[in-house]
Amino acid sequence: MMKIAIDAMGGDHAPKAIIEGTLQAIEEYGIEVFLIGKKDEINKYVEDKFIKSGHLTIIDASEIILNDDSPVTAIRQKKDSSMVIGLKLVKEEQCDAFVSAGSTGAFLAGSLLKVGRIKGIDRPALSPIMPTMQGSCMIIDAGANADCKPKNLEQFAMMGSIYMQTVNGIAKPRVGMLNIGAEAGKGNELTKQSYELLSKLNINFIGNVEARDILDGVCDVCVCDGFAGNVLLKSTEGTAATILKLLKQEFTKNTKNKIGALLLKDGLKEFKKKFDYTEYGGAPFLGIDGIMIKAHGSSNANAFKNAIRQAKILFDNSCIEMIKEQITITGVDVVE
Amino acid sequence: MMKIAIDAMGGDHAPKAIIEGTLQAIEEYGIEVFLIGKKDEINKYVEDKFIKSGHLTIIDASEIILNDDSPVTAIRQKKDSSMVIGLKLVKEEQCDAFVSAGSTGAFLAGSLLKVGRIKGIDRPALSPIMPTMQGSCMIIDAGANADCKPKNLEQFAMMGSIYMQTVNGIAKPRVGMLNIGAEAGKGNELTKQSYELLSKLNINFIGNVEARDILDGVCDVCVCDGFAGNVLLKSTEGTAATILKLLKQEFTKNTKNKIGALLLKDGLKEFKKKFDYTEYGGAPFLGIDGIMIKAHGSSNANAFKNAIRQAKILFDNSCIEMIKEQITITGVDVVE
């Protein structure tokens, strides 16, 4: 049975939504969970049957790492926090995965400091999955590495391809490099230097992709430095949110519009579902020697359940092992 | 009377839409226009009254620079192209501005080679205006400089602030730096190093801004390197286009939805208008010693007319002179 460590205290709706999502996940996926956080609070939401069944263990943690905490300091000093205890359970191989909706900074720093990288991977990458018109697309990296070297993008491409292959079941994931023009010679120094490296990898590299085509589904993996990836992700989220807000204003402006919106209710629901992030799980931190899933800070129970599902699929398909194997085979050098 | 050189042959709908927009602009703004391109083709769309009134001169140009042409080579070799002739008219001070919907690459290269930079400005910036919930926001740079130094961002901030002040009439434009976190210490090496420089400028620097907040209207000027700015702009455009496409699908799926959409027709029109790029003119190439406006490649007549209006407002408010003055006063050093 797969064992997953869960940070019960991270996220805007913790611990209630986190625990609800976790209990649903236990029932649906038959996993064993170590739920970490303030025991008194957790007990409010947990039924005895889960503990009796052997599927749930509560681990008391007296501290919580906050979004405002300095990540590295918090990981070093808050030794009894739900985040640090969860990371240690993975490091000590008592758990197969760690899922948290807490501080992204602490999650990244903690994963690096407490669990560590896969040998051969220079820089692990935060790799959220974005819904597209044709399925979904992994953005790798989306913010863990603001400055990157060509070697980093090469490793991102390799890891992203393996993820979409093993976890999403795509035989030959289309790997594109985010760029400001489609032709091979375009871009900044980083993308110009990376193009050839990516071309030589044993993946389905489709060349440069432009930001305007990602949502249309031009590729399955979008390789980029963490700064550009973060801009891509957040402007997509922001644009969608602003448009939905504007539409809502129009739809409630007068009676005629309200009736029109009522008639369109099902259609709008369909539409919203397509962009519902809660269906798409969290962001794996790929390159860490363990399954690390960062759930969205605003996760509700469903979103958190799906982040756990994602950890399970990663585990069932030996994604991390595949990355380890590939990094050894291809002999992608380590540059420190 | 202001004199404007117009590239009649650039853009997806040239020369028809370009000429239509130009003739509308002559009637509305009382400018004098030099319309450059294949004379036979231009004559199809021009009424004699414009020429007789002294507001329009047609200049024959036998060549056209295409989007596929290598920008620098095309500017050097196609000496009798509408683009090169237009640029020369500005350089020789026969015209006060140049407006083109043609190849962006050739427009940028040509402006630099044929017209030249303002003394003291290292790197001119392509600076489109994006509609926001609160008005509009200039993205500077949006693709002219894929790699930037802190000094470049400093000059972009200064130029963007002056533009929004003189052209859009905002007393203290809120200048933000695009970043992947709101706090001062966040970002990549470029933004970390630029933060203090921007803080010291005599502008209303509001600190870091995140991509998700641009469309909401968090700032009037968004300073960034051309790679990040291009990703921001294109992902915003792409997301809006994809969402509108999806909505259209839903709205025509069945009779009930069609009736609902019909009732919402006015509301949806309002909504679309808010994001109608044709209302927002083109992208000035700021830092060139002349008024250079790059209209959208897909410009229709209205979009092109508004790009000409923008050139006129820049001229009427002495925007380029203000930039020249400010670069001398602040003594922002030139780094070559």
Image (spheres, coloured by chain):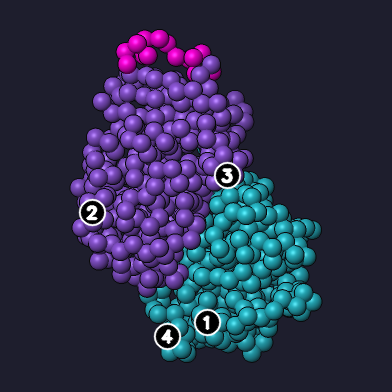
Chain colours: A cyan, B purple
CB under 8 Å between discs 3 and 4:
no
- B241 w.r.t. B189: above or below: above
Report the front residue among A200 and A277.
Answer: A200
Residue A73 numbered tag: 4
Start-end of magenta stretch: B41-54
Q: Is residue B48 magenta?
A: yes
Tell me the crowding category of disc 2: few under 14, some 14 to 19, or many 20 or more residues within 10 angstroms, Cα based. Answer: some
Q: Evaluate whether label 1 is on the same chain as label 4.
A: yes
Report the front residue among A22 and A70.
Answer: A70
Residue B256 seen in this snapshot: no
Residue at point 23% right, 56% down? B328
Q: Evaluate whether label 2 is on the same chain as label 1.
A: no
Q: Which residue is mark 2?
A: B326
Quadrant housing the N terminus of chain B:
top left
Q: Nearer the viewer, mark 2 or mark 1?
A: 2
First reached walking from the N terminus: tag 1 or tag 4: 4
Q: Is residue A7 magenta?
A: no
Q: Which residue is mark 3?
A: B73
* SS type, badge 4: helix
Q: Nearer the viewer, mark 2 or mark 3?
A: 3
Residue at point 51% right, 53% down? B231
Dot 2 falls on which chain? B
How far apart, in angstroms, are the residues tagged by discs 2 and 4?
43 Å
Q: Evaluate whether label 2 is on the same chain as label 3.
A: yes
Residue A110 numbered tag: 1
Residue A14 numbered tag: none
**Kind of residue at badge 1:** Gly
